C-alpha cells in the first residue's frame, strides 16, 4: 500500500482478535460486517500476509496476527487513554477514570467506594476493569490499579494501604449439619470450595495449607466472587476475605489460628496523571477507603 493504514484498521483488527469473528467485532464496534472485512483486507495487504483463516469456530488468528496482537492492543489502550484524558475541563474533577482491580476487590469493595465518590463528585464517571491479570498502567490500559503486589516500574506512583486477610469461612447451617473442624486435618472430611484452574497465586496460597490439594475440593470454581457466593449458599467451607465475611451475620470463621493469610493492597497510577484533578481525587479516595478497609481487617 502507498500509505499507512488508518487507525480504524487497527481497531477492527484488535476487535476481531478479541471477538473471534467479523460479526461479533462489528457488533462490538458498531460498524457493518463488510466494513470490518475491508479493514482486515487492508491490513493484510499492508503487511503482505494473512491474518486470519476461517474455521468451524469462526476466524482463527495466524502466527502473524498473534505477533501483532500486543501492539494492536497497546494502540487501543492508548486511544482509550487519550479519550479519557481529553474529557473534562482542565483542573476540574470531571471526566472518566478507569480503575482495574481483581474480581474480589472489584465485586466486594469498589461499588460502594465509587458510589460515595460519585455522590461527592457528580462530574466523575468510572470504568471498572475487573480482572485477576495485571493490566499494564504503563500502556494506559487503566488509569488507576488496585494490586496485591508492589509494582516494580519506577514511573508509577504507588501507595500501600495495609492488607486484607483471607481465612476459612462457612455458613452456620453447614457447620450445624457437618460440625466445626478444629484442625487443618479435619478438612478432609468436609465439603471444600476451591479453585478450578491453578495459577501462580493459587499455588502460593496453597503453600500455606499443607496436606490440602485441588483433588479435595467438592466444588471447583475460578473467581473469588463465585466462591464467596457458594460459601453464602451453605455449600461448604471456603476461603474469602475476613472483612467481607464479617458483613454476613450467617457466616462463621473457622480455623482462624491455622490459616490467616494477609494480602497487601497497593493503589497505583502512572506518574503522568498526578496533576490531573480527577485522577488525583480518585487516587486519594481509594487510598482513604482501602486504608479503612484494611484497618478493620486487622481484627481478623
Image (spheres, grey):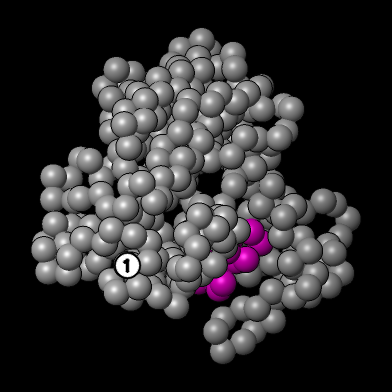
By secondary structure, the bulk of the magenta-drawn segment is best described as helix
Q: Which residues are magenta?
A: 13-23
- In the picture, residue 105 is in which quadrant? top left
The reply to whether residue 228 is in sight is no
**Label 1: few (<14), some or many (≥20) within 10 Å?**
few
Which residue occupies the foreground of this view, 122 or 28?
122
Q: Residue at x 64, y 42 (%)?
A: 136
Residue 185 horizontal side relative to residue 71, left or right: left
Residue 170 horizontal side relative to residue 157, left or right: left
Q: Residue at x 31, y 43 (%)?
A: 242
Name the spot of residue 175 as percent of width and height, x first: 16, 62
Specify the farthest residue to the top. 91
The residue under label 1 is 186
Looking at the rendered structure, the secondary structure element under dot 1 is helix
The reply to whether residue 244 is in sight is yes
On whether residue 248 falls in the magenta region, the answer is no
Compared to 98, does 237 lie above or below?
Answer: below
Compared to 93, does 4 lie above or below?
Answer: below
On whether residue 19 falls in the magenta region, the answer is yes
Figure quadrant of the N terminus:
bottom right
Name the spot of residue 122 as percent of width and height, x first: 31, 21
Q: Residue at x 41, y 24 (%)?
A: 291
Q: Residue at x 53, y 26 (%)?
A: 160
Amino acid at each position: 500500500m502507498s500509505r499507512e493504514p488508518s487507525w480504524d484498521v487497527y481497531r477492527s483488527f484488535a476487535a476481531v482478535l478479541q471477538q473471534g469473528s467479523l460479526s461479533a467485532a462489528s457488533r462490538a464496534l458498531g460498524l457493518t460486517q463488510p466494513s470490518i472485512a475491508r479493514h482486515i483486507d487492508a491490513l493484510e495487504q499492508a503487511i503482505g500476509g494473512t491474518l486470519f483463516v476461517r474455521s468451524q469456530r469462526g476466524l482463527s488468528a495466524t502466527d502473524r496476527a498473534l505477533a501483532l496482537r500486543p501492539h494492536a492492543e497497546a494502540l487501543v489502550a492508548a486511544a482509550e487513554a487519550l479519550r479519557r484524558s481529553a474529557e473534562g475541563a482542565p483542573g476540574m474533577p470531571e471526566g472518566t477514570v478507569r480503575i482495574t482491580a481483581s474480581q474480589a476487590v472489584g465485586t466486594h469493595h469498589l461499588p460502594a467506594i465509587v458510589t460515595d465518590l460519585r455522590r461527592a463528585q457528580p462530574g466523575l464517571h468510572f470504568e471498572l476493569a475487573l480482572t485477576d491479570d495485571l493490566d499494564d498502567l504503563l500502556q494506559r490500559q487503566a488509569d488507576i490499579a488496585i494490586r496485591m503486589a508492589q509494582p516494580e516500574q519506577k514511573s508509577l506512583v504507588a501507595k500501600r494501604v495495609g492488607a486484607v486477610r483471607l481465612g476459612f469461612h462457612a455458613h452456620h447451617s453447614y457447620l450445624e449439619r457437618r460440625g466445626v473442624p478444629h484442625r487443618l486435618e479435619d478438612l478432609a472430611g468436609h465439603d471444600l470450595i476451591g479453585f478450578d484452574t491453578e495459577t501462580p497465586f493459587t499455588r502460593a496460597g496453597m503453600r500455606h495449607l499443607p496436606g490440602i490439594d485441588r483433588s479435595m475440593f467438592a466444588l471447583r470454581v475460578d473467581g473469588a466472587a463465585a466462591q464467596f457466593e457458594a460459601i453464602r449458599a451453605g455449600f461448604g467451607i471456603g476461603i474469602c476475605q475476613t472483612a467481607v465475611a464479617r458483613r454476613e451475620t450467617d457466616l462463621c470463621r473457622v480455623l482462624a489460628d491455622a490459616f490467616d493469610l494477609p494480602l497487601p493492597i497497593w493503589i497505583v497510577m502512572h506518574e503522568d496523571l498526578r496533576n490531573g484533578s480527577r485522577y488525583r481525587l480518585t487516587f486519594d479516595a481509594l487510598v482513604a477507603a482501602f486504608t479503612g478497609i484494611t484497618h478493620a481487617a486487622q481484627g481478623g
